[in-house]
Amino acid sequence: MKLNKQNKHLSVEPSGWYWLLYIIPALLIYIIFMAYPLLDSLRLSFYTGSNSSNREFIGFLNFKKLFTDETLSVRYKGAFSHTIIFFLINMVFQNGLGILFAVIITTRTMKAKSFYQTVIFIPTTFAVLVTGYLWKLLLNPIWAGDTLSKIGLGFLARPWLGTKSTALVVVSLISCWQWMGIPTMMFIAALKNIPKDCLEVASIEGATAWQTFTKIKVPLIKPVIGMVTILTFVNNFNAFDIIFATETVNGAPNYATDLLGTFFYRIGIAGEHPIAIADPGLGAAVATITFIVLLLGVIPMLRYTSGDN
Amino acid sequence: MKKKVFFVMLIVLLTLSTNAFAAGSSETKMEKVTLTMGSWRADDVDAMNNLLEAYSLVAPNVEIEFKPTNPADYNATLRLQLESGTGPDLMYARSYAPGIELYQAGYFENCSDIEGLSNFTKSNKAPWMAPDGNMFAVPFAAVSHGVYYNKDFFMKAGIDIPTTWEDFLMACKKLQDMGITPLANGLADEWDILETFFLGALPNYIGGANQRVKYETGEMKLNDEKFIKAFTAMRDVAKYCPKGFESVTYNDSQALFATAKAAMFIDGSWSVGTYDGVGFDWGIFAIPAPKGNNTAICFHPDMAITMNTTTEHPEEAKAFLSWLCTVEGATTASKYLPAGFFPMINAPIAIELPQANEFLALNEGKETDARFVWPVLLALYSPMDQAVIKVMKGEITPTQAANDLQKAYENLDL
């Protein structure tokens, strides 16, 4: 009887709010460190003033200023378009090469796989400041020029990072060089998961390598391609460090490599040299717009790639 | 029983006496005051520690800790500290607008009643004078700008120190014909070409402070003949910069000059200590003015020190500032200041490093002024910088550059 009662008690369904207890710790951390700062920075974008004592509410004026102020809007549009170019170059070269290397490395007849894997992955372990500094020296004619002309490549000794027309492309390629290892690893992992019999059947049926790639491999690793795309999109829209390391926070030369990240840093955090009085409200407005763009970009990407599963 | 009482008495006595000793020692400790000092001169830790140690001979009960920040982050860091109430007791104050802003926000103390301030000339005080006429810091050090040159190269090429801009270009040509890179300056870091070169040379074209004011009020235009001539000088000199100077950074330039890969480098006086011990003989001359103009010097008020309005030890902080304003204090300070930072006090002070003395001697008999944009037109810094860089790259003509600058001026809300 007693036993029965206990059993009965145990089998009672937990009340409706029981599950909430389990997520409270994670929820608290998320709210304190993610949601609150995010919402607070949204709020900050409606204020002006360089410090808490002279802060005042100005509604949407910061946003208006970004798009209409004569010098500011030019810089902002410049930063926005440079960021898109930066993202596209990374998307095409970093991820394109990543997929190419992954396919080559996972080929059955490939030798010394782990060696190549390591070589491709090593740059991602370098600090961006180090990479930036090294490439700055390599691409600088006064340091690398002599060596280049000795091996008959003197025409390459040009101020790549100091020329307006080449700086952004070159910086983007430096970023590709550094981060290529990550998509490569992800694609290798995905390609290894493709069932062997699929590929065997394809080869028995006489499919060419290209057909196997487009008809079997790509469709099967599509979720990973989606994830890599999202990561590239988010990381590159927030890019700052590589420009800081190679071209100063002004996005030299003549703002040709100014990205949203450097623009935001100058406006909202450090202020422009030499006045160096930041406008956190205006900076928050830049960050808010970037956040919205990322949100609008990521949601369809997520739906597209996960919907197929 | 008796024993017990004695024992208790003993314990009571012991505790009393130790308490008394403790009280005594803590009393002497109380007198020692520790102040912190914020600064953007992270390179000067040793120099400043020596200077502050010298001050402890004057005020033995005060210890000042030098806590510098990375130069580029100083303004932002200091603001955060001040806002959160953790600001240093003493701190370096920027000249003109950035300093005035912190004074008006109530963080910098009004220093007007420090007696020694009468030891400074009006023009040396102006950079730290708020619009209300109060001084918000005491002037500490100024920097100058000039041409560093490699005497060995000049001897080899048989060149004398050029006294006009035309001679300067001729000298550059001669060096280049001999296969020597004449100038080490580059464009990659953007700030140095403007602050040391263009603004360093500008007084040669427009004159001193009394002329600068006319541009600030709009009486004279920034696209007049004088400015076009200054921009033309930048266009003409570009071909004497290193090959690929578009991507040469400030550090690259210093390295080029120090390794004798370039014959000259137009730089600020703060680098004068950098070339101590390079393997060649070097000196300094003023950036020469074009024929018909008088050579003038860009002598820029750079550093001042002020105190926090909320410091716990206002008396000790103020005493230190007052000491800096005495001739004795300024002499001690200049002894320990890093080479190339010059005292601003109105008294003859000897400087040890010969090249630093050479730098200071450039001022003699010449008009001097702060960097053109600093006093009022700081908002023109970026437009002017971009104009200089574009002219040197040949993307725009000197006339276009001057017109762009005038347009930027008209868009300011002064």
Image (cartoon, coloured by chain):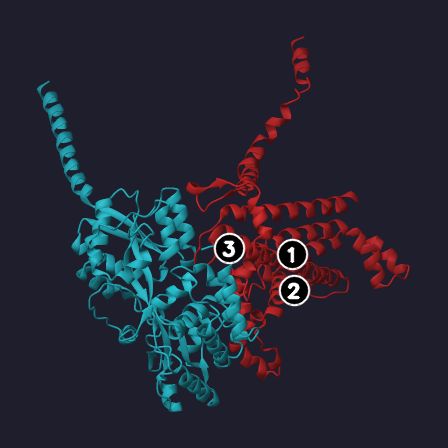
Chain colours: A red, B cyan
For the N terminus of chain A, give its image quadrant. Answer: top right
Q: Which SS class for mark 1? A: helix
Who comes first in sequence, dot 2 or dot 3?
2
Q: Residues within 10 Å of mark 2 (few under 14, many from 20)?
A: few
Q: Chain of mark 3?
A: A
Quadrant of residue B21 within the rendered picture? top left
For disc 2, the marked residue is A115
> Looking at the image, do the residues carrying marks 2 and 3 touch, with CB atoms under 8 Å apart?
no
Marks 3 and 1 belong to one chain: yes
B327 relative position to A101: left or right: left
Question: Percent position (x, y) of residue B383?
Answer: 50, 64
Q: Which SS class for mark 2? A: helix
Question: Percent position (x, y) of residue B19?
Answer: 16, 33
For the point 66% across and 15% down, the residue is A9
For the C terminus of chain A, give its image quadrant. Answer: top right
What residue type is disc 1 on? Ile
For disc 3, the marked residue is A266
Q: Which of the two marks, 1 or 2, is nearer to us in this view?
A: 1
**Label at residue A182:** 1
Q: Chain of mark 1?
A: A
Who comes first in sequence, dot 3 or dot 1?
1
Who comes first in sequence, dot 1 or dot 2?
2
What residue type is disc 2 on? Phe
For the point 72% across and 66% down, the residue is A111
Q: Which of the two marks, 3 or 1, is nearer to us in this view?
A: 3
How far separated are the C-alphas under marks 2 and 3? 42 Å
